[in-house]
Image (cartoon, rainbow, N blue to C red):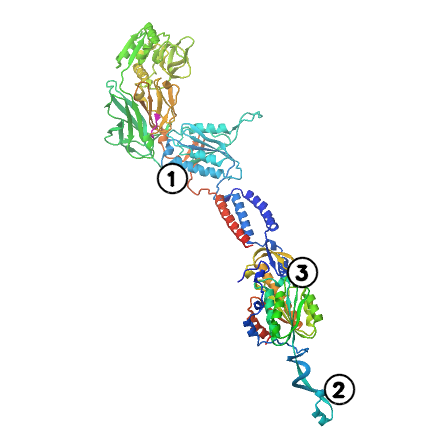
């Protein structure tokens, strides 16, 4: 039993009871009774007064009831409650992890609640404990609630309202994102920073107590440092023994020699200490296509010097199958484990498509011969004049990809371009200075689809155009003198630009060039999307291009619900970030078309950190190791007594009223 | 158990006819009773009881020497013949009994259930009837009542009634008494003592709740040879107020002088009241004993027949 505001109740009691007693005797409504003589009565009362100096305080039933009523009200004002726990004044930030791993159903021992639900219940109890000021006394505690996954969200800024804080916690929804705590800490610290215009020392960060509800599997813990005055309590949620395996990556490819077929590759990871085995199931458009003949064995994790713990990994490729049309590929790891969300991964394979490519001002036979070697629908050779004419007339729309071979073009209408050498006239790329000589690759973005199987270690460029890049331009390959390969994505214009003429380098003699050109053409032509991508990760937006005339755009979510998509420019549509993994279907209408057009996107949770779901016993905040304590919830809820006491007081008041009425009627 | 009275009884409940005071059945039962006196008094006329005075009855009492002036008819001539001296034969004379019943008609008596005053009137009627039937000289007096104009009346009295035929007259007189005045017990006793000729039995019917004390009033009559009976009449609601619903926060108003007492009635107060009542009644009784006054406490809930035929016979007032 804890009294939240004992002083308040005591003061009220001390202030009210004496006046009541005074009023009781001053304004006592006595019933008039005529008797033969007051002689004996006066003597009796005088005797009592003589014997008992406090005879007037001798309780009558009504006075007793009134005093009891006052006492009950005072007790209610004192706000008794069960075990109010540890109160703490000052500012407290509640950080609640709502990443994918928090959806595991091991929040409680019964396995009926997810970690997130358990964490929310525990956090609410903590709020009630921290914020135990009740309704009559302002608590000095201020609470801020932050939910974090890939992105951090302030559920409520610092508030001294217990209800607001509880509502903020209750409103936290599950996601399939990753655990990234850095954004949450930044937000919290932003609210903690006090800017005093009169202070000469600049903004001052007030210390705060951080309380974290998580399973401890947080991506960026090592990047975070507790500031001076900050403390953090780690409330561990979930079991430290829950095991899980999951899909680490998925890819599909149409073989060069058989574009009507699709081959699916998948990698399974096992972050546990024992070898695990599982059957894999491949579904195409919802129909099971194949199941592994025997379970795939995934080795346990390994501790590698310098690298630390590396999950066991097993790659598996399904046999190619015929699929001319586009398809939704899904791979499922059969069998139950702790985290079902990473046991399924989807992939959208576009229809087998042959590209129409135009090469402009083709001086290099190397480039032309590579393009001729690709399985294209057509390859047209255009000179500059013809290109300019088509650019003005819109004739370039007939080509999926236009390759500029060091061509000095003047116009670049919307389209997809692969250019070499001269800097194309497009916003975001500005050539400066004199060409650089003797350039070698310093760094390349190997995870980009066009750089698959592209090893640039031996590349030597004798002369390159130096360019500066603007917004929307990504440098894929970089040298000491600037970008060598850039990707520009500006709405209707998509461009891969190589800042040097291949003939000014040794690239035509390298195998990487033979891989780069088809990768780039297929990527620009839309073929490469499914070949290497593993879909969209939760937390990322869905970005796509729709026809300019698209209208009535709607997005169907994995749970079957639909949302209208509002965009001013369908040709550059971004929706999201997505919260849950699964298949998202974008549909739209075009004037003149009776059917709704549809496009499907697969959102997969393939993050290695989220795959490891055994709760961490402690978390390492850079140099600070924080030991966790198991989060508590569902125990004794801090139950306020005062509503019950008020109810009893009300009942007592009714009884008193009834007695008073009866006595009045009798008098 | 009766309810605690909220004031004087309504006029409708008061006796209006003589039959309301005494009915034929009670008369028949009282016919064989007589008032006893612990003393033998001189009467004015020859009565039906022995007197200390030697008189003319047939019952011989004594001899005494003849003195000049004695009636020669009572000289015992036989003795004169033998002793040659004149002696007179003395006979016990039978006298009538003087009986006065004093009724307290003050406001304090006009209360209770049954009302004390009505009970006192009925008791006075019954005692008076016994006196009339036995050829005693019956007088009645009332003090503390109101006159016909509603003002406090002087001592009201009706004197020297004798014989059964005066019963109705006595009853009407009792019925005409209007209660409601202020005490005046001492003054009434003083006036009765001064104006009363002769000696006899005096029965005082009152609650004896006199704020100025009952002692001086009784003192007037106790020293003058009266065989005084003080019958203290109390209502059951006075004796046990707690049992008759007296409770709560009360403003008690005195019927006689409108004096007020604020009382929160609870067990302690009731206990204190009872102690005071016992002490008061005990004080009255002790005083009466010291003054050779017979004190009798009468509860108005007591049946009048039982009181007359049983209790008062045991107490020696009636036989």
Looking at the picture, how far across and down is residue B91, in whole percent?
Answer: 67, 85
**SS state under label 2:** loop
- Residue A590's place in the image compared with A295, above or below, is above
Q: Which residue is mark 1?
A: A108
**SS state under label 1:** loop
On whether residue A556 falls in the magenta region, the answer is: yes
On whether residue B223 falls in the magenta region, the answer is: no
Q: Earlier in the sequence, mark 3 or mark 2?
A: 2
Q: Which residue is mark 2?
A: B67
Q: In the rendered structure, the residue with mark 2 lies on which chain?
A: B
Looking at the picture, how far across and down is residue A319, in whole percent?
Answer: 24, 25
**SS state under label 3:** loop
* Nearer-the-camera pick, B98 or B295: B98
Check if mark 1's residue and mark 2's residue have beta carbons within 8 Å. Answer: no
* Few, some or many residues within 10 Å of mark 1 (<14, 14–19, 20+): many
Range covered by the magenta-colored residues: A555-559
Report the label total: 3
Q: Using the rendered image of the protein, determine whether residue A236 is visible from the camera's viewpoint.
A: no
Looking at the picture, how far across and down is residue A132, in whole percent?
Answer: 50, 39
- Tell us which disc is closer to us: 1 or 3: 3
Label disc, if present, on residue B151 of the rendered structure: 3
């Amino acid at each position: 039993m804890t009294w939240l505001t004992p002083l308040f109740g005591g003061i009220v009691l001390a202030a009210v009871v004496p006046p009541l007693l005074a009023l009781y005797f001053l304004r006592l409504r006595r019933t008039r009774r005529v008797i033969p003589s007051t002689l004996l009565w006066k003597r009796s009362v005088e005797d009592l007064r003589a014997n008992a100096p406090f005879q007037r305080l001798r309780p009558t039933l009504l006075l007793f009831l009134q005093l009891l009523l006052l006492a009950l009200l005072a007790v209610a004002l004192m706000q008794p409650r069960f075990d109010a726990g540890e109160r703490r004044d000052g500012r407290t930030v509640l950080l609640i992890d709502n990443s994918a791993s928090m959806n595991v159903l091991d929040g409680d021992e019964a396995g009926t609640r997810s970690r997130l639900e358990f964490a929310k219940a525990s956090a609410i109890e903590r709020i009630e404990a921290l914020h135990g000021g009740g309704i009559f006394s302002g608590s000095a505690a201020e609470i801020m609630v932050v939910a974090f996954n890939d992105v951090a969200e302030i559920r409520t800024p610092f508030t001294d309202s217990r209800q607001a804080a509880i509502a903020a916690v209750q409103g936290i929804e599950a996601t399939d994102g990753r655990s990234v705590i850095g954004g949450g800490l930044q937000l919290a610290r932003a609210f903690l920073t006090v800017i005093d215009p009169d202070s000469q020392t600049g903004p001052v960060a007030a210390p705060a107590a951080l309380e974290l509800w998580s399973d401890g599997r947080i991506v960026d813990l090592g990047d975070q440092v507790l500031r001076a005055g900050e403390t953090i309590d780690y409330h561990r949620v979930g079991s430290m023994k829950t095991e899980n395996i999951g899909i680490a990556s998925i890819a599909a490819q149409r073989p060069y020699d058989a574009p009507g077929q699709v081959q699916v590759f998948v990698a399974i990871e096992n972050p546990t200490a024992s070898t695990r085995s599982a059957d894999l199931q491949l579904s195409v458009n919802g129909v099971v296509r194949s199941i592994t003949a025997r379970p795939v064995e995934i080795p346990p994790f390994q501790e590698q010097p310098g690298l630390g713990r590396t999950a066991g990994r097993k790659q598996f490729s399904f046999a190619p199958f015929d699929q001319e049309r586009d398809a939704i590929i899904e791979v499922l790891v059969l069998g139950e484990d702790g985290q079902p969300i990473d046991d399924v991964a989807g992939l959208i394979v576009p229809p087998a498509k042959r590209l129409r490519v135009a090469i402009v001002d083709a001086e290099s036979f190397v480039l032309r011969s590579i393009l001729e070697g690709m399985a294209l629908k057509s390859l047209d050779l255009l000179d500059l004049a013809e290109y300019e004419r088509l650019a003005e007339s819109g004739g370039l729309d007939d080509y999926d990809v236009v390759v500029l071979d060091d061509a000095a073009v003047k116009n670049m209408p919307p389209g997809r371009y692969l250019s070499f050498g001269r800097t194309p006239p497009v916003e975001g790329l500005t050539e400066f200075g004199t060409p650089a000589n003797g350039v070698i690759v310093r760094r390349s973005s190997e995870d980009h689809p066009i750089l698959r199987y592209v090893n640039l270690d031996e590349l030597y460029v004798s002369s390159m155009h130096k360019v500066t890049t603007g917004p929307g331009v990504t440098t894929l390959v970089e040298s000491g003198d600037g970008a060598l390969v850039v990707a520009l994505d500006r709405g209707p214009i998509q461009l891969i630009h190589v800042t040097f003429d291949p003939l000014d380098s040794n690239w035509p003699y390298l195998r990487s060039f033979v891989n780069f050109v088809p990768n780039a053409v297929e990527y620009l032509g839309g073929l490469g999307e499914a070949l290497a991508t593993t879909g969209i990760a939760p937390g990322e937006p869905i970005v796509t291009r729709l026809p300019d005339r698209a209208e009535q755009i709607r997005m169907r979510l994995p749970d079957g619900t639909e949302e209208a998509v509002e965009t001013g420019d369908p040709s550059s549509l971004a929706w999201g970030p997505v919260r849950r993994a699964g298949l998202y279907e974008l549909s739209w209408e075009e004037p003149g078309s009776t059917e709704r057009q549809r496009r499907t996107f697969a959102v997969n949770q393939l993050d290695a950190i989220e795959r490891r779901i055994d709760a961490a016993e402690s978390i390492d905040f850079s140099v600070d190791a924080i030991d966790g304590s198991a989060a508590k919830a569902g125990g004794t809820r801090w139950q306020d007594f005062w509503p019950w006491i008020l109810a009893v007081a009300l009942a007592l008041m009714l009884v008193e009223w009834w007695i008073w009425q009866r006595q009045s009627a009798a008098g | 158990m009766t309810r605690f009275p909220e004031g004087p009884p309504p006029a409708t409940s008061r006796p209006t006819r003589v039959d309301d005071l005494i009915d034929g059945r009670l008369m028949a039962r009282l016919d064989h009773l007589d008032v006893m006196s612990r003393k033998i008094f001189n009467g004015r006329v020859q009565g039906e009881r022995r007197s200390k005075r030697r008189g003319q009855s047939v019952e011989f009492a004594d001899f005494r020497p003849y003195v000049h002036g004695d009636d020669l008819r009572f000289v015992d001539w036989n003795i004169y013949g033998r002793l040659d001296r004149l002696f007179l034969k003395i006979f016990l004379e039978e006298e009538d009994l003087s009986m006065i019943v004093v009724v307290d008609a003050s406001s304090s008596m006009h209360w209770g259930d049954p009302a004390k005053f009505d009970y006192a009137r009925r008791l006075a009627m019954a005692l008076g009837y016994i006196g009339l039937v036995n050829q005693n000289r019956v007088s009645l007096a009332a003090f503390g009542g109101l006159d016909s104009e509603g003002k406090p009346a002087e001592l009201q009295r009706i004197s020297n009634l004798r014989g059964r035929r005066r019963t109705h007259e006595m009853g009407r007189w009792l019925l005409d008494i209007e209660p409601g005045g202020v005490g005046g017990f001492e003054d009434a006793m003083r006036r009765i003592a001064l104006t009363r000729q002769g000696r006899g039995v005096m029965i005082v019917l009152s609650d004896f709740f006199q704020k100025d004390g009952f002692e001086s009033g009784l003192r007037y009559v106790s020293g003058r040879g009266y065989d005084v009976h003080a019958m203290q009449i109390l209502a059951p609601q006075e004796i046990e107020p707690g049992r008759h619903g007296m409770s709560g926060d009360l403003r008690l108003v005195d019927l006689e002088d409108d004096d007020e007492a604020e009382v929160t009635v609870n067990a302690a107060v009731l206990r204190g009241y009872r102690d005071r009542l016992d002490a008061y009644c005990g004080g009255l009784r002790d005083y009466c004993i010291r003054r050779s006054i017979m004190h009798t406490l009468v509860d108005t809930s007591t049946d009048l027949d039982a009181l007359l035929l049983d209790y008062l016979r045991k107490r020696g007032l009636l036989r």
